[in-house]
Amino acid sequence: MILGKVCGQIYSTINHPFYDHKRLLIIDKLTIDGKPSGDYLIAIDSVGAGYDETVLVIDEGNSARQIIDDKSAPLRSIVIGIVDEIDK
């Protein structure tokens, strides 16, 4: 599981049919200190996350496909939660 910050959204006019009506977010992975690392990934949004929100991301295909219940989905990363607070 990855902790990240939403820093953008992907728009496409041509894509695999699986991605129709799904939001693709650009996630900046956070370091252990909670600072942006500059290491990005693209993930499907399953929770309605918005810009600059801290989120939990699964970056493993089989786990992501289980969440959307589609064994053949061309999917690797999915946002599964919005973080309200981090206690250190």
Image (cartoon, helix red, strand yellow):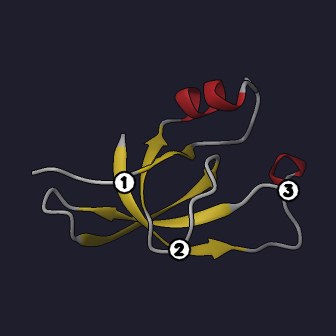
* Number of numbered callouts drawn: 3
Residue at 44%, 66% (x, y): give it: 53
First of labels 3, 1 by sequence position: 3
Residue 23: image quadrant is: bottom right
Q: Is residue 16 left or right of residue 3?
A: right
Q: CA distance from mark 3 to mark 1?
A: 26 Å
> Would you name the residue on which mark 1 appears?
84
Precedes in sequence: disc 1 or disc 2? 2
* Residue 5 placement (x, y as % from top left): 40, 66
Foreground label between 3 and 1: 1
What label does residue 51 carry, if any? Answer: 2
What secondary structure is marked by label 1?
loop
Identified at 37% across, 59% down, the residue is: 4
The mark lying in front, picked from 1 and 2, is 1
Identify residue type, mark 3: His
Q: Amino acid at mark 1?
A: Asp
Element assignment for label 3: loop
Give the Cα separation between the discs numbered 1 and 2: 14 Å
Question: Label 3: which residue?
Answer: 21
